[in-house]
Each structure stands twice: as structure tokens, then as C-alpha cells.
Image (cartoon, coloured by chain):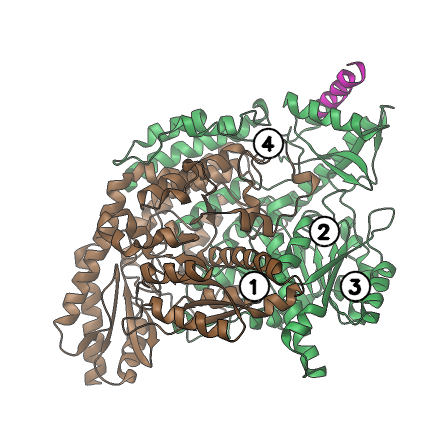
Chain colours: A brown, B green
Amino acid sequence: MEAPEFREFAKSMVDYIADYLENIRDRRVLSDVKPGYLRPLIPDSAPETPESWEDVMKDIERVIMPGVTHWHSPKFHAYFPTANSYPAIVADMLSGAIACIGFSWIASPACTELEVVMLDWLGKMIGLPKEFLACSGGKGGGVIQGTASEATLVALLGAKAKKIEEIKVLHPEWSENTIISKLVGYSSSQAHSSVERAGLLGGVKLRGVAADENNRLRGEALEAAIKKDLEDGLIPFYAVVTLGTTNTCAFDHLDECGPVGNKYGVWIHVDAAYAGAAFICPEYRPLLKGIETADSFNFNPHKWMLVNFDCSAMWLKDPSWVVNAFNVDPLYLKHDMQGSAPDYRHWQIPLGRRFRALKLWFVLRLYGVQNLQAHIRRHCGYATQFANLCRADERFEIVGDVNMGLVCFRLKGANEKSEKLLKHINGRGKIHMVPSKINDVYFLRMAVCSRFTRPEDMEYSWKEVSEAANDICNG
Amino acid sequence: MEAPEFREFAKSMVDYIADYLENIRDRRVLSDVKPGYLRPLIPDSAPETPESWEDVMKDIERVIMPGVTHWHSPKFHAYFPTANSYPAIVADMLSGAIACIGFSWIASPACTELEVVMLDWLGKMIGLPKEFLACSGGKGGGVIQGTASEATLVALLGAKAKKIEEIKVLHPEWSENTIISKLVGYSSSQAHSSVERAGLLGGVKLRGVAADENNRLRGEALEAAIKKDLEDGLIPFYAVVTLGTTNTCAFDHLDECGPVGNKYGVWIHVDAAYAGAAFICPEYRPLLKGIETADSFNFNPHKWMLVNFDCSAMWLKDPSWVVNAFNVDPLYLKHDMQGSAPDYRHWQIPLGRRFRALKLWFVLRLYGVQNLQAHIRRHCGYATQFANLCRADERFEIVGDVNMGLVCFRLKGANEKSEKLLKHINGRGKIHMVPSKINDVYFLRMAVCSRFTRPEDMEYSWKEVSEAANDICNG
């Protein structure tokens, strides 16, 4: 494909995208295809000679769209939001054109340097202490990871390397394997599944500590778990504090857990994957209290801050533990300027990385802080709107607090009723939600996800829930 | 930003991209900025209110381009190529608009199903045995990873899980930590740095086995290493066979190493990150001999097959070892169709994933197999052209064989001369290369990287090398 054709094709795609997103409300939100639907729709091998781009464009509606679950529809309330915005899409086009691999500074200085400065911009926006920012001139700084799962794993590996080095000094007679077998990390029992997975990947024990009745991890519970493990000869090294759990968007008490971590030499990693974006609004920043005790902090602009996936922002007070843990440095990756700017390949699991800072830059400049704050506040308002509709219907109950853009609710009574309700809702496919369960109480999660949502969309979603409840209760 | 503005902005970006790529040859390939160049060029915090997209566009040339190393210039010969094509850029635009997170089938069935079928298309194109393909109806199948580093790590973790389970049956009295401390994996001493890093991340020993005089791992050497470790009470579990090393694009003897792996119950992972794309040409497929002995195979269409980063294709004969090793399955990620299609979150390190199969689909259809083959053959031809120019100059010598699109060469005599030469070349910034070193012999690597390369570009690059040599030899 040559440039003139690309200009036509890409501009035709621009129009398709604008039409798709502006009319996304009209599509069935949850795909109703059956597994295996796609294979019969296309040939069983690649064509020998080129097809026309017009034919490829036609196949989007025929082959792809029937199998798409529309995450950006105002009728999508599953999981948590994933971001999508026009500035981010355009930035990604530029990133695809430059298509550098930013594993070292010299591989494209702009790729590294814009990332360093954007993470400073973003850190200031959410009120991070200056120890986390590169502009402070200290050790700290930020990096864009692909996902929060990777941030959790990277922090765990850094904490593991740090603790192994500490213990080796105290017990030179212990083998590394002996030390690793004694390491133990912590998170709330409400933490995301990726935390447990990080423990499996990192080959260390991770303990789920019971959260309180509000699904929040308390300092006392964390300290009790640490003390017990110390008595048993284990070595506490890492704790994940979640700000905004996936189940109910509960906030662990960072101001209690952080000091406990510091007291026992336990690395505190703060996972604010979804809710962290809210800290750009000063009124939510009290939930960040205690952040000065953390060693690493992570949130996903690709969830709730309009920067397309993948853009998971992570800050470390002292990146050297991560950088040195896995520093493998062949000659073909060395360069003369090493040390004067970060070589981000040492900060992450993969070697390669795209020019992801561009989309952060475009979104921050083309929205401005105020519009991003307005976006957060609008979503929180919609959750309140939905919760009020729910509270006004005596068949329903809200589960826990309504935090950020998430409402957890259920039909009063046995779990089976709510399970039947959700099955009915998703079967109709007019709106889409997923369930969760805490202490054997099953509930539905209504997450506000779309940037296109309007108050009447929330009314529509509630009406759909209410009608499904009618069907269930009468059926 | 609303849709009408997006249409203007994005179309303006389309034109910028076409202009940038069509004229990329005219830019200085290696950025000559100094570390810290970017920070003073932009404000120190995000704007409160939106800027105009025209202002953002203007800043691309002012802020970004001075710090870009142009990977797609015909004058770029560093590392290995990374892919960039018009069809892939357009596909990524669509992926950014749909912006689903394909962690499970239901999260967007098209995202999973297109990936399954595209990996079948691609597997057929390179002649993989049917045991690796989902269309065979067996266990096997493919997945798109972010990078080859992740594929190496995922395979290692699968191999580790498999071997631990085997040993637990034989030695129920051994703890998991005891078993892990005995595990040992292998790769050629010429393997990529990410293999060593996978060992560090996975917490197991990895041994570099000396390659032969042609930098290729032989079956005999692998078997000797395995036997020695068995005698020492260790447990061999994993071997990486590299097809196309980073240093010299050498090919390990898969047909020798594979049977050794099978004989000793050692998982064979084939890393063909760069060179694997060449297997779409039947004449290169003899280098794939022995592939039926492998457990997993990986190559990067995002390197040499015109699919933009990230698209690292991986096939597993039996994915269950990977899937079950880290299967953490909370209620909010479960769905009714589980088991009838892959839930790719279990096949990879992160949880989230973009709709990456789209760019594979677009590239395969809009180029067609024949044009992709022509691209590979052209690059190999350019390498031969450069090598011949080099051979005709008696000051130079070629290091090893000329494989695929890579030429390794040096000034005859002491390393210092070639080191000085490369420094001089990169200092002039007209072309860009990186060095490597084997057995204390330092050499320059000339990789053919750009899809815009023409024969006269190779003449230009050679002329630049030759003139730099004049400067060095006379200076």
C-alpha cells in the first residue's frame, strides 16, 4: 500500500471511527454471537495477493462488529471503564508512524524524555509527594507500564530483590532459595486477582488479610499478620494497599497500613488502578492520605482518565531496586549517555515499548485538567443518580458504600434472585454488567464506563434493571 | 474534543504521517539531542484548560522530532527492524476506537476469535506442524504476546509448572522450593539477553551453553550440559533454541537440540523473534527443520513482517501448562461460555490486552502473502549487496555468515579500529548502527530495517562506512 492509498484509507477509517463512536448507543452492547462464530466468515488462510482496502472496510461490519462487546457504549456497566478518547486515538496514530522502540534513551530520546516529564505532570495533578517525581532531582520517578498487573509484579520483584539483599547481610549462611522460601507478602482479601497472580509469577507467598466490614484493609490487621509471620520465622517483604477495589471500589486505610509497612521494612505498593484518576480532583485526595509512606504507586490513565490502553502510570521512590534486579545489558543495547536519563527497559518486564507518552501528552493538553476533573465528577454523579433510583425501589438494596463511579446492588433476599436477575439482564443484552460476591453475598456491579453517558442513559439502565426485576419477580 | 474536530485533527495527522514517512530519508537518522533536551521545551505542568489541536500539531516538529531516532529511515541499521506499515497503522486506529480489553472471550468475542484464526493463518504461512494450530482441533493454538521477552518468560513458566508437577509425583517428600532450587534451563551463549532475564524473573537457573564456531548451539553440547546437571542432581526442564540470534543472526541446530530436549523431558522453546518471518518464504524453511520436536514457537511479525509493535506471535502445542499455572479466576471475570474458546488472559503475563489481531488481519490481506515474501527477499538481497561492497574493500572483513538482512563486519585488525569507526559513523549521524562482540572480537552490525530501502540506499550506507574508514585510517 502506497501513501496516496493510505491517505484515502486512513481518512475513511477516521470517518468510520467517528460514526461508530457517535452512534455507539444504538448498538446492542453485549455481543450475542456463539463461540466459533467468526471462523466460517473468513477464508481459512491468508490471500496470496492483496485485497482492496474497500473490501477490508466492508468486512468490519460483517465480520468484526457482530462479535464486539461495546465497551464505550453508555449501556456498558461491566468491570471498570477502559479509556477511549479522540486525542488519544490521534496520538496513537503518530506513535504508530514513528514506531520507535523506546528500550533505551538513545533508541529515541523523545520517547523516554516525554515519558519522564509526563509522569511529572501527572504526579503533580494527583498530588504525589515530590519524592516520587523526577523533577525533584532525587532518585524517584515515573514510568508507563502496560497494565496494573505488571506494575504490581514489578514492585513485587523490586521488593523481593531489596529484601533478599538485606537478609543476605544478616544471614550470609542462608542460600537465596532459603530466603525466598521465607518471604511473605500481603494484600487485602479484597485485592484484585492480579495481586495473587503476581505472587505466583514471582514465586513467593502472598497472604490475603481479612478486610474490615467495609471491605477495607486496616493497619491493625496487617500488623497482626506481619507479627504472626515474624514469630513463625518468615520474612515479611511486600504489601499491596488497594485504593478502589474491583469488587466494591473500597479504599484500604493507606494512612494506617503505610506506617505499619515502614515499621517492619515491608515495601508498600499502592494499587489505585481505577480510582487513582479521581485524585486529580482535590476533594478525593483525602483518600490518598499516607501516600508519603509508600514505596511505589500505580494508577491507570487507561481506565478512567481518557488515555487509551495501554497506559498504566507507576511511580517509584527508589527505582534502583527494580532497575538493578534485572539489569541484563548486552553490548548492542549499551550507549554513551547511560546514566544521564532512564533506560526504561530496566523498569519493566518486556524489553520493547511503544511511544506511549504521546497519548498522555495529547490528552492532557487537549482536555486540560479542568475537563478531566469534570469527567470524573460527572461519572461520580451518575453513580449517585443510579444509586438513588435503586434506593427508591424497595425490592433492591445497595451493597456497601457508593464509591466513585461504581454502584453495587442486589435484590433483597437469597443470592439466587440476583443471579437470575443478572442472567436476565445480560440475556436481553440492552445493558451489560458483571457480578461479584463478598462473604457469600452475591451482587451486581453497575460501573459508569462511557464518556458519552448522559443522565437519560442512567435512567435507561435503571429502567432495564427494574423491568428485568419485574420479569424475575413475576416470572 | 468532539467528533467534527476529531475528523479534522485525525485527517491532518494522516497527512502528517504520510509526509513524514515518505520523506523520512531526508531526516538525520540518529537524534543528536543531549539528555534533558525536552524538559525546557514544554511547560512544567499540564494546562488547566484545553489547547487547540493545531498547537499540538505544531509541537510535533518543535518538541518531538528533534529527539526521534528514525527507525524507519533507510539509513537506520541498528538492532533489528521494527515493523511499520500503512495497513497496520489503520488497523490500530480501529483497535483504538473499539478499545475493548480482550481478557476473556465474552469481553469481545471478535477480539479472541480473530486472534485464534489469524494465528492459524500465520502458522500455515510459515509451515508450522498442525499440532500448533487451533484449526487442527487438538490442544494447540496461538496467541499474540506483547514481546518475545514475554513469550520466553511465559514458556519458561509453563515448563516450570510442568516439571514441578512431574517431580512432585516422583518425590512427594520434596517441597516445591526444593524442586525449584534444582531446576535448570539452557540456551546458547548467543541467546538474547531477554532469555537470561526470563531466568532471573522466573527465579530459576539458566545455563548458557557454548555455541559452535558458527555461533550455533549443537545438540551434542546441549546433551552434555544436561547430562552433567543430571549427574549433579539437578533437574533440566527448559531449553531455548534461537533461530536467528541478535548478535549475528545465527541459527541453532533445532533438528539436533529438539530431539535432545524430547529425550530428557526438557521443554523446547524456539525463539525466532526476527528471523521467523523469513519462514513465509519456502526457501528458508529448511532452517525450521526439527520444529515438530518443539513445545512452543515464537516470532515477531512486529519485527520483520510489517505489523506494527506490539505483535509477537506464539504457538504452544499444549497451552494447558501455561493456562493452569496462573489461573486466578474471580467471579467478575467468569462467563457462561468458559472452555469453548480461549480466555487469553491465562496465556499471558498482563491481564489486559488490546485488539491486536486486527493489524495482522489488515496486513495479511492488504499485502497478500506474495508481497510479504517479496519484502523479506528484498531485505536479504540488500544485505548481500552491502556484504559484496564490504568484501570488495580489503580494509574490511565480514564476521560469520551473512544471514537474512544482517551483515556483521569490521575493520581488519585490532578492535579499537572498529570501535573508532562506529563512533565516527554514529557521530556523523548519517546512518546508524550498533556493535556487538563475540569471543572478544568487536564488530559492527548492519541490519536492513526500512521498508523504504532501495538499492541506492545501500550504496549510500556503504559509502558512509567507507568514508568514515578513510577518516579513521588517515586521521
Residue segment shown in magenta: B460-475
Name the residue tied to disc 2. B279
Residue sitting nearer the eye, B196 or A392: B196
Considering the whole magenta stretch, tell me its main secondary structure.
helix
Q: Position of residue A242 (x, y in %)?
A: 37, 62
Q: Measuring 41% from the left and 52% from the top, which residue is drawn there?
A: A297
Q: Chain of mark 1?
A: A
How far apart are the two marked residues, 1 and 4, measured between alpha carbons? 32 Å
Residue B466 on the magenta segment: yes
How far apart are the two marked residues, 1 and 2, measured between alpha carbons? 35 Å
Disc 3 with disc 4 on a shared chain = no
Name the residue tied to disc 3. B258
Q: Position of residue A311 (x, y in %)?
A: 43, 49
Q: SS for tag 2? A: helix
Disc 3 with disc 2 on a shared chain = yes
Name the residue tied to disc 1. A202
Which quarter of the image is occupied by the N terminus of chain A?
Answer: top right
Name the residue tied to disc 4. A337
Q: Position of residue A163 (x, y in %)?
A: 55, 59
Q: SS for tag 3? A: helix
How far apart are the two marked residues, 4 and 2, measured between alpha carbons? 37 Å
Which quarter of the image is occupied by the C terminus of chain A?
Answer: bottom left
**Neighbour class for label 1 at 10 Å: few (<14), some, many (≥20)?**
many
Determine whether, in the image, residue B135 is placed left or right of residue A427: right
Q: SS for tag 4? A: loop
Q: Which is more N-terminal, label 4 or label 1?
A: 1
